[in-house]
Image (spheres, coloured by chain):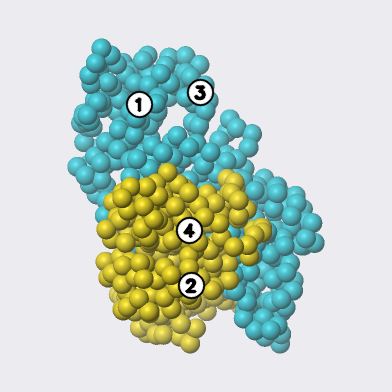
Chain colours: A yellow, B cyan
Amino acid sequence: MTGGERAPAAPLRTIRLELVPLDPEADAGPLHRAYGDEAVMRWWTRPACADAGETRRYLTECAGLPGARLWTVRSSDGPGRGDVLGLAGLLGAVDVPGLTWLLRRDAWGHGYAREAARAVADHALGPLGLDRVEAWVEAANHRSRAVAAAAGLGERARLGQRYPHREHPHEVIVLGRAREEEPTAVLGTVVELPVRDVAGTLRLVTAALGARTTFAMGDPPYLAEVGLSPWSGGPRFRLAAMDPEEPPSPVLLHLDAATRLDALHRAAADAGAPVSGPPVLRPWGRREFVITLEEGHELTLSGPG
Amino acid sequence: MTGGERAPAAPLRTIRLELVPLDPEADAGPLHRAYGDEAVMRWWTRPACADAGETRRYLTECAGLPGARLWTVRSSDGPGRGDVLGLAGLLGAVDVPGLTWLLRRDAWGHGYAREAARAVADHALGPLGLDRVEAWVEAANHRSRAVAAAAGLGERARLGQRYPHREHPHEVIVLGRAREEEPTAVLGTVVELPVRDVAGTLRLVTAALGARTTFAMGDPPYLAEVGLSPWSGGPRFRLAAMDPEEPPSPVLLHLDAATRLDALHRAAADAGAPVSGPPVLRPWGRREFVITLEEGHELTLSGPG
């Protein structure tokens, strides 16, 4: 990625909107109509702000993160000209530039979020010279998925996340747009686990993980692939017949079970897989359980803590 | 997935179209206007058909594959009522039900492909009772990506493919739609390679693979993650410090380099990685080269043959 993060943000104009660099002190009042509204904040990383002071402190913090560029979204015509409708911009302190937006509830339904998000994405990939922007949208948040799509972002990956104020984890879609179409360098990785009994291990792990066999070679099989996605492509690993005279060479494989960790634990236990016990919270903040195969391979299934 | 594949296909109606079960004998003539047109067949798995006889044989073959359900797409009103505009349906002999469509060039630009593809997807996930349908669309084929999106399909995975009649491989987007929203069971796998020198191996493999470090713990690092995608999430693997007293436990890891295999080979050689030589075509139909790390780990990079 190249240049320009430190220059002050410039105003951006779209057909119906004006995006004005955020001034947390001056803008917290009008923006609190969004940040203080539970319905607006339903998908946010934190609960609604209790008052305009809390909104101001939160905006000041967001604006101060390295690389952040935030704009208020304002109506540029009509009787409400200049009114603060919401906020859009680029998040700070992220590995990959992150697009963010939010609108007052009474400004929903007019396509303003799409117009603002597209303006920020175009600005980021154009004048700012960034190579890519991405937005993390909760899978169940169909409105924001449509906003991201309208801003030219397509699905790139999925992640599991749990916000501190929420009891349960959720699935996040990473939507991204690159400045230039780029072929994907590496589409996926597939590790090969050497096992004594390919057929038996295949039965065990497909049942334990709710997985499918994407291919099996030989009868009995000497090589088979365990597909972890119901779709073509996606995560997978292989089982390969090992030389029974050789000592096993154990492999450590992590599987991101995202929102399905407890269901997978039950399925694995029901399938008779040698599981370590129920998922436990580990010091690195993930809940995990382990399936240990007889060759010593450890399949660690984890989800957000 | 459930039932019904063997029942004869029923006609489907949309606002402007009628989808009539394919009769290869009767329909090959009019459909040859599509299958014989280089511009229509640009993205197809095979070259344009030379004459109506070849189109008939090809359609007969497609219709005979187990699970195939194909309909001619016909105009249902106006002066051209009943005219065969193209074909839509479900492919046979595929692991995951596959949506297919194609229109005569003079029928492009009216949204007919979207209307037909959506009708087939709705029928597949509704009356036919399928759990999911997917479409494989070349990444550069933006018209078909828009058709798939309009039919409710979203990106699920990417694959590398080479058609027998083409010199170069291409990147395919697997777009899918499920009958019911379903949380992803396992989002990804991350294998841990035990290495003597995490920092040194990290420098080597990130340079060789054009990868990035998504995290590193300790100074010098005892655990680090190599991210193979420029986006958050996506394929990755880890390097973990091994006990120098123990013998190494070599891991075999396959990396799908899709369309970028030759570029990755050059980058790996330039980075001084211990590569096996240029990519070679293996008996299983993939081109491959191998990076062997000093602990015996084999990173096999492969692309379509």
Residue tagged 1: B110
| Image x and y of residue A55, in percent | 38, 75
Q: Please give the name of the residue rendered at 44% of the width and 52% of the height, measured from the top-left corner.
A: A18
Mark 4 vs mark 1: same chain?
Answer: no
Q: Earlier in the sequence, mark 3 or mark 1?
A: 3
Residue tagged 3: B39
User: Which amino acid lies under the numbered mark 2 shown in the image of this protein?
Assistant: Cys
Q: Chain of mark 1?
A: B
Q: CA distance from mark 3 to mark 4?
A: 47 Å
Q: Nearer the viewer, mark 3 or mark 1?
A: 1
Position of residue B110 in the picture relative to residue B247 (left or right): left
Q: Nearer the viewer, mark 4 or mark 2?
A: 4
Mark 2 vs mark 1: same chain?
Answer: no
Closest to the observer, A205 or B257: B257
Q: CA distance from mark 3 to mark 2?
A: 51 Å
Q: Nearer the viewer, mark 4 or mark 1?
A: 4
Labelled pair 4, 2 in contact (Cβ < 8 Å):
no
Q: Is residue A148 visible?
A: no
Position of residue B69 in the picture relative to residue A226 (left or right): left
- Judge whether A126 appears above or below A226 on screen: above
Q: CA distance from mark 4 to mark 2?
A: 16 Å
| Residue A186, label in figure | none
- Mark 2 nearby-residue class (10 Å; few <14, some 14–19, many ≥20): some
| Residue A62, label in figure | 2
Labelled pair 4, 1 in contact (Cβ < 8 Å):
no
Determine the residue located farthest toward the front in the rendered image.
Answer: A79
- Mark 3 nearby-residue class (10 Å; few <14, some 14–19, many ≥20): few
Q: Chain of mark 3?
A: B
- Where the C terminus of chain B falls, by quadrant? top right
